[in-house]
Image: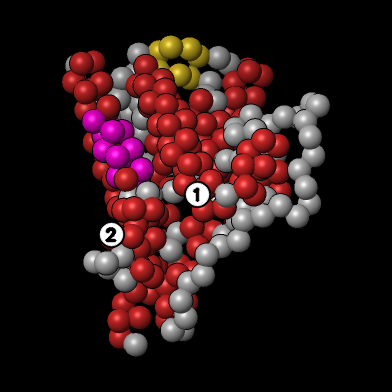
Amino acid sequence: MFGRLLIMLYAITSYAVFLGSFVWAVGFVGNYNYLTAKSIDVGVSGTVTEAVVVDVLLLALFAAQHSVMARPAFKRWFTRIIPAAAERSTYVLLSSVILLLLFWQWRPIPIPVWRVEGVAAAVLTGVHWLGWLIALSSTYMIDHFDLFGLRQAVLALRGTDATAQPFKTPLLYRLVRHPLMLGFLLAFWATPEMSVGHLLFAVLSTAYILIGLQLEERDLIVEFGESYRRYRQRVPMLLPRLIGGRRTEETETSARGMR
């Protein structure tokens, strides 16, 4: 029982660190300095070359950890070392810590790329916030607490093994296969003031998302087989097929958020 309580405490701590990193992410990307003192365009900056090198390395570190730890082979190996109920929380904790490191050590490159005002600025700001809303809400459309390791810890506390989540396509998952990533892309790109540093972040993050989704979908096909193949044929990856698209079936089994 003591070990189960430790796993529960560990999961809660990991989730708290995630919440902190998420709030900083919103402030970081949007330059909302009432949320964070340091953001994508605000902070100590050196030469452009130094900034590019540091920023690329920080993003590469996050991409490597995020992708390697998400692969089934790594999970099988990792759960020989730690309890299976703590695997997801560890993934969430390390991802969040690396994100916090990225935000802390990011080197701004505040050279302007574009700046718009008036109605255009209001529209872009609205799309930006819509992106964060889509990203957060899509986690609740599947299983928010499973995605961030709390469900596994609660089941372990009860002495119950976690079972695999069923495959289904609720709400936004009927429009795109990865609404979580769509939300991030909208939040990253929709800004009335785009700097070189922000553009670097958006371009590299987009490249990572597109590569990472290919790896994730390969794993989902292995896990769910023909059901996921049919889902891929009907539903686009990121851009909704709003006109002339086929309707998804009511009882489809869920694309999970990116791991």
Q: Where is residue 10? Give x, y as percent.
A: 33, 69
- Which label sits on residue 159? none
Query: Dot 1: what SS?
Result: helix
Q: Secondary structure at mark 2?
A: helix
Q: Quadrant of residue 1?
A: bottom left
**What amino acid type should be assigned to the residue bearing mark 1?**
Val
Please tell me whether residue 168 is drawn above or below residue 192 in the rendered image: below
116 or 208: which is nearer to us?
A: 208
Q: Is residue 197 visible?
A: yes
What secondary structure characterizes most of the magenta part? Answer: helix
**Mark 2 sits on what residue?**
77
Q: Does the magenta portion include 110?
A: no
* Distance in Å between CA atoms under marks 2 and 1: 18 Å
What amino acid does circle 2 point to? Trp
Disc 2 or disc 1, which is closer to the eye? 1
Tell me what residue is drawn at x 47 percent, y 46 percent: 219
Question: Which residue is rendered at x = 78% and y = 47% of the image?
Answer: 249
| Applied colour scheme | secondary structure
Which percent across, then down, holds residue 102? 29, 38
Picture coordinates of residue 209, whole percent (x, y):
45, 33
Q: Residues within 10 Å of mark 2 (few under 14, many from 20)?
A: few
- Identify the mark at residue 222; answer none if there is no mark: 1
Identify which residue is drawn at 60% across, 24% down: 124
Residue 208 picture location, percent across and down: 40, 31
